[in-house]
Image (tube, grey):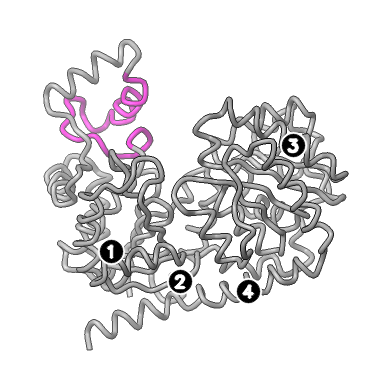
């Protein structure tokens, strides 16, 4: 059976791309992936197609994309104003039906849109990876609107559509966007199923969208657990072996994985205010260094670049964001401890039994993960931990380190359970398809 896979995020540098790779590996057990929309399409500034109706010929779309990114600078500012005056627009609109109308109207002119339409048409089923992109914010996220458009496209082509591996949440800062939520509900009610990755998202759908055929399946990244079951999965003792191009001098010679180490990563909330984060995390690093183990910083996404300042100031190692993803996961899986506000890197750590201390993020990501991994009432700290919270983090870190292998084994058992659960996803999709045609 041919599947059109929407949302393969391996084109993004974010370490969460590992979940998309794991999901595609899972789906390939039961489906032939005949087409794919990569995650870079979610961002208008880097997508191969997005702005339509431009005066500039499609073969120069790369220049249009660059002008959009730099539209506040001369000479691009007047160019973009002229393009908009004559009808250039983002093909993604708030209404998914309008987005699909735009795609169909302009697909002959823009090859990337043609490819999306052809691949969806030729597939037997459309599978949409929701990941952490469905947040009902005001204004609505383009990522959310893009996923809505792809669901609408599949339904319009009369294909069975599934939403998988997804979080669904109100926005922690702007509250619930009622219009976007209602649109999502109407579309999901027409889908064959929605597979949510955490209990909070599942309960949200059960409460707010009761007609949706919802199921709870853990994140696809748990399927990578067997990769880290062997002692051979440890990162190389000399950390220079994993540094990506260009091998920056400031990172060279600083990573030593032959000795026990603690990893500290960033977070979406921290990345939204890098100056404040650099100050707060600098204090956190100083406090954790007092535990006597070396500290390694992990740049899990580009907004975590504030960690580079800290690494340079403290003279400690940093694993760059563009590190090969399996090597990055190995670093976390074999650390003594991981402190972070990042969802998928925390799962990577858990695959090897590494205890996690969770920092706050947008929506309910980290809180839900703490529950999923059975951390009990030891929930999350603030995205910018206060001095009092840093002291509590150090105390908790001492406790986790003292528990040693017994705690690591408990974490691995929980991860093993979730690995077994997510491995059932392809069969559940097939089962739902059979039931729909019974």
Identify the mark nearer the N-term, 4 or 2.
2
Q: Nearer the viewer, mark 2 or mark 1?
A: 1
| Mark 4 / mark 1, whichever is N-terminal | 1
Q: Secondary structure at mark 2?
A: loop
- Neighbor class of circle 1 (other Cα within 10 Å; few <14, some 14-19, many 20+) is few
| Residue, disc 3 | 285
Q: Which mark is first along the chain, 2 or 3? A: 2
Query: Which residue position holds label 4?
Result: 416
Of helix, strand and loop, which one carries label 1? helix
Q: Kindly indicate the quadrant of the structure image that contains residue 411.
A: bottom right
C-alpha separation, residue under disc 2 versus residue under disc 1 = 19 Å
Q: Any magenta on residue 18?
A: no
**Image spot of residue 106 (x, y percent):** 15, 42
What is the x, y in percent for residue 312? Answer: 73, 26
Asked if 313 appears above or below 299 in the picture, the reply is above
Q: Which residue lies under the disc numbered 1?
A: 208
The residue nearer to you, when weighing 253 against 294, is 294
Residue placed under numbered mark 2 in the picture:
217
What range of the chain is rendered magenta?
Answer: 44-71
- For label 3, count other residues whose C-alpha is less than 10 Å away and answer few (under 14), some (14-19) or many (20+): many
Residue 153 location (% of width, % of height):
20, 57
Q: Which of marks 3 and 4 precedes in the sequence?
A: 3
Q: Work out which residue is located at the far bottom of the displayed protein and give it.
A: 438
Q: Position of residue 406 (x, y in %)?
A: 79, 70
Residue lying at 28% horizontally and 42% vertically, measured from the top left: 140
């Amino acid at each position: 059976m041919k599947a059109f896979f929407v949302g393969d995020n391996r084109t993004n540098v974010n370490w969460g791309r590992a979940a998309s790779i794991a999901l595609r590996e899972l789906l390939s057990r039961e489906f032939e992936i005949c087409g794919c929309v990569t995650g870079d399409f979610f961002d208008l500034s880097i997508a191969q197609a997005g702005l339509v109706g431009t005066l500039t010929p499609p073969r120069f779309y790369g220049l249009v994309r660059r002008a959009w990114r730099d539209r506040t600078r001369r000479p691009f500012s007047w160019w973009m104003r002229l393009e908009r005056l004559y009808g250039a627009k983002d093909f993604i609109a708030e209404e998914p039906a309008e987005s699909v109308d735009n795609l169909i109207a302009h697909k002959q002119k823009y090859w990337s849109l043609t490819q999306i339409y052809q691949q969806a048409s030729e597939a037997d089923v459309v599978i949409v990876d929701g990941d952490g992109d469905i947040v009902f914010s005001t204004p609505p996220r383009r990522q959310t609107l893009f996923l809505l458009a792809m669901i609408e496209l599949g339904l319009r082509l009369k294909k069975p559509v599934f939403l998988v591996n997804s979080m669904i949440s109100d926005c922690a800062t702007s509250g619930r966007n009622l219009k976007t939520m209602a649109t999502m509900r109407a579309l999901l009610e027409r889908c064959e199923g929605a597979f949510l990755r955490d209990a909070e998202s599942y309960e949200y759908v059960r409460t707010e969208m009761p007609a949706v055929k919802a199921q709870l399946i853990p994140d696809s990244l748990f399927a990578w657990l067997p990769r880290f079951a062997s002692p051979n999965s440890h990162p190389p003792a000399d950390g220079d072996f994993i540094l990506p191009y260009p091998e920056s001098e400031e990172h060279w010679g600083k990573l030593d994985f032959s000795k026990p180490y603690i990893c500290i990563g960033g977070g979406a909330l921290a990345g939204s205010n890098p100056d404040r984060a650099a100050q707060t995390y600098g204090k956190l690093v100083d406090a954790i260094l007092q535990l006597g183990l070396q500290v390694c910083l992990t740049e899990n996404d580009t907004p975590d670049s504030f960690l580079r300042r800290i690494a340079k100031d403290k003279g400690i190692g940093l694993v760059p964001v563009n590190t090969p993803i399996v090597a990055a996961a190995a670093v976390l899986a074999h650390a003594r401890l991981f402190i972070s506000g990042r969802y998928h890197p925390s799962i990577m750590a858990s695959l090897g039994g590494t205890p996690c201390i969770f920092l706050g993020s947008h929506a309910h990501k980290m809180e839900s993960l703490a529950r999923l991994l059975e951390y009990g009432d030891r929930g999350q700290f603030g995205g910018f931990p206060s001095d009092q919270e840093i002291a509590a983090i150090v105390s908790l870190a001492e406790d986790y380190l003292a528990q040693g292998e017994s705690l690591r084994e408990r974490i691995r058992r929980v991860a093993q359970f979730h690995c077994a659960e997510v491995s059932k996803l392809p069969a559940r999709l097939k089962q739902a398809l059979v039931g729909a045609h019974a």
